[in-house]
Image (spheres, rainbow, N blue to C red):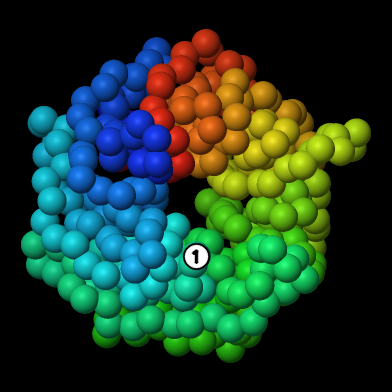
Amino acid sequence: MFAQNTYLFVGTYTQKESKGVYIFQFDTDKGSLTPISITKNMQNPSFLTISPNRKFVYVVEETAKGKVNTFRFEEKSGQLILLNTQSVNGDYPCHITIDKTGKWVIVGNYGSGNFSLLPVQADGSLGKATQSIQHEGKSINLSRQEAPHVHSINIGKNNKDVFVVDLGIDKIMSYQLDSKIGKISAANTPFTEVKAGAGPRHFAFHPNKAYAYAILELNSTIVSLYYKDSKLTQFQTISTLPEDYKEENSCADIHISSDGKFLYGSNRGHDSIVVYSINPQTGQLTFIQHQPVQGKTPRNFVIDPSGNFLLVANQNTDNITVFKRDKKTGKLTYTGTEIKVSMPVCLKFK
């Protein structure tokens, strides 16, 4: 059972007025946000992840020669206490996740096209990276795909399968994590290749079926995949845009409701959240709605623990907007609630 009040962590770019990571309290009955704290002295603390025991928060600094910061979260005060900082052995880390044992953190480095594995120490802090894996190659979009660009790290429910989505090479790379010894190795099927120039970005596992979905940034589509025996097989590609929309657009984030009935994706340019239903028998997506985000450049978004609300981080209008979510239809309705945060790019509920 979720609490009525839960913490929302907001990662940002500090290129304008942002001071760092913002923490709010979210009321899951009213859909309202109350400012709690700001954690400062970081440069572009864009993406973060929370440990399985909810006691620690790991925050990347998306810069050349990137870093990851470990914080202990003080539940009563809503403050983050810095434990340590480590190098991520790469440039411009844009994604971070933690395995289900809470012992291993994996960071994806967009700039250098690699990812690194870091061990979690007994006190929750991070040790130095024990492994870094470099991707190779390029694709057809000369301005965006001149080299590998790791964009997300996704660990399966078995805590073994690791799918690393690389925008630069149009591949979802497949690995195996041995969480006992902390080693990542290539899977038997080393990658799943998408359409050239599509630019895969983020990824979502279905919560209770053998499906997975990837959102493709550069051609504004979502690809549906069967996920079985550590292997992905494509079976549907669907546009995230209206047929008559001809302006520029790039996709960002993707999430599935906890009941597995609906999938959501963000459009930057069209500035909307696209909503689909998921057929439970086939995994096929069917379009339901485009909901304007009441801002520009929706980056990350998140469904709250109650499932009744969806919150959107609008990077270029410096605001977070709150939408009511109909659990029966999947549709979104703007609540009129927004808060100002400069360049929000990541939303995570504790």
Q: Is residue 35 visible?
A: yes
Count of numbered circles on the image: 1
308, 339: nearer the viewer: 339
Query: From this viewpoint, is residue 95 visible?
Result: no
Q: Give left or right: position of 339 versus 182.
A: right
Q: Residue at x 21, y 39 (%)?
A: 39
Provide the residue designation for mark 1.
110
Seen at 48% across and 82% down, the residue is 134
Residue at x-position 51% and y-position 35%: 315
Which quadrant holds residue 86? bottom left
Q: How far from the left and from the top, in percent, is residue 130?
A: 27, 82
Q: Amino acid at mark 1?
A: Tyr
Residue 289 point in image, percent of width and height: 74, 28
Residue 32 position (above or below residue 302): above
Q: Quadrant of the C terminus?
A: top left
Residue 48 location in percent, x, y?
Answer: 34, 51
Residue in view at x 11 percent, y 56 percent: 83
To which quarter of the image does residue 332 belong?
top right
259 shown above or below 112? above
Q: Is residue 144 above or below residue 349?
A: below
Secondary structure beneath label 1: loop
> Going by the image, does 268 lie left or right of 241?
left
Residues packed near mark 1 inside 10 Å, few (<14), some (14 to 19) or many (20 plus): many
Q: Quadrant of the N terminus?
A: top left
